[in-house]
């Protein structure tokens, strides 16, 4: 006669490490958190993504440096914009880049109102956010998507004759922050300072730094910095301000130098 205990143990025996025996806590966290919580909330990011974005979510300062566009400097051919984002410790936080491709290049150079898409990736290749710029004849708007593809907010350009004004809006279009540029400034060998306000209180600044006469007059390779004051602790607003810096480059400074050195020498 067989021992019931042994039979029960034998039936319950399974190979070590089988999928059915693995604790639920070992399942990938990213898939389980997609679509949960407010868009962009770091509490619902994976541990790895939250750690890589710490400089954005908690730091006091970011730098955004656009890659040098050699073809644009020479002949005025606008290349896809690429940016490198660093924290206050000078470490690279993420890379941001426009879509590449032959058709995208044609639209970029022959249709100033074409749609644009910027992908922001961490060093590990994880998507941190994306920015979509739909077709518009004027007053550009950037739709900012969080890491899981949900709308985190909007960056909306506003009309003003004497200065640049951009709003940081909720996903529903409600203004939350206002970014105001300097008055009556077209070109200067000094920095551009854009103040970020919540109501009447300044909570941060976006600065476009003067990067030298050659780069300023013959190309569109720009350097920005973002300063977060103590009153700007909302991690969603911090991510949106990074998106706003990229938007400011596109709506305010991108067209500078489009004629190119060779084109100007040939009389273009």
Image (tube, helix red, strand yellow):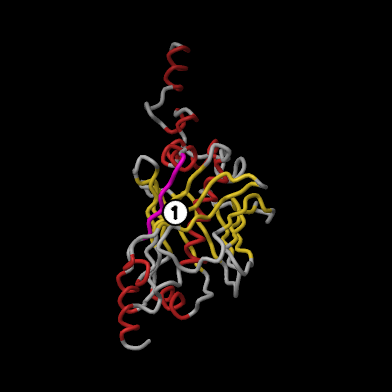
- In the drawing, does residue 71 fall left or right of residue 141? left
Residue 61 magenta-highlighted: yes
Q: Position of residue 167 (x, y in %)?
A: 62, 56
Q: The C terminus lies in which quarter of the figure?
A: bottom left
Quick check: 215 above or below 178? below
- Residue drawn at 44 percent across, 54 percent down: 120
- Judge the density around disc 1: few (<14), some (14-19), many (≥20) Cα neighbours within 10 Å: many
Query: What element does badge 1 sit on?
Result: strand
Q: Position of residue 87 (x, y in %)?
A: 40, 43
Q: How many numbered marks, from 0 up?
A: 1
Q: Position of residue 97 (x, y in %)?
A: 41, 60
Q: Position of residue 194 (x, y in %)?
A: 53, 55
Q: Specify the quadrant of the image occupied by residue 187.
A: bottom left
- Residue drawn at 63 percent across, 67 percent down: 160
Which residue is under mark 1? 120
Which secondary structure is most common in the magenta stretch? strand
- Residue closest to the eye, 160 or 93: 160
Magenta segment boundaries in residue numbering: 60-66
- In the drawing, does residue 156 fall left or right of residue 56? right
- Residue closest to the eye, 57 or 217: 217
């Amino acid at each position: 006669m067989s021992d019931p205990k042994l039979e029960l143990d034998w039936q319950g025996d399974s190979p070590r490490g089988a999928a059915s025996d693995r604790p639920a806590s070992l399942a990938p966290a990213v898939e389980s958190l997609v679509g949960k919580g407010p868009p962009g909330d770091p509490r619902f990011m994976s541990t790895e993504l939250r750690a890589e974005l710490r400089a954005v979510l908690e730091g006091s300062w970011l730098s955004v440096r656009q890659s040098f566009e050699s073809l644009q400097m020479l002949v005025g051919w606008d290349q896809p914009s690429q940016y490198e984002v660093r924290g206050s410790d000078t470490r690279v936080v993420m890379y941001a880049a426009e879509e590449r491709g032959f058709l995208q290049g044609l639209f970029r150079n022959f249709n100033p109102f074409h749609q644009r898409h910027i992908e922001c990736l961490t060093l590990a290749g994880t998507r941190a956010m994306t920015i979509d710029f739909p077709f518009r004849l004027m007053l550009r708007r950037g739709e900012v998507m969080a890491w899981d593809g949900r709308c985190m907010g909007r960056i909306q350009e506003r009309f003003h004759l004497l200065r640049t004004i951009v709003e940081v809006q909720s996903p529903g279009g409600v203004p939350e922050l206002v970014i105001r540029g300097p008055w009556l400034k077209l070109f200067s060998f000094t920095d551009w300072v854009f103040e970020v306000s919540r109501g009447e209180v300044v909570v941060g600044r976006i600065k476009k730094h003067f990067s030298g006469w050659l780069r300023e007059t013959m190309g569109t390779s720009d350097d920005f910095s973002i300063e977060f004051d103590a009153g700007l602790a909302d991690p969603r607003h911090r991510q949106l301000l990074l998106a706003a810096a990229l938007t400011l480059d596109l709506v305010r400074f991108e067209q500078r130098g489009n004629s190119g050195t060779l084109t100007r020498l040939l009389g273009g």
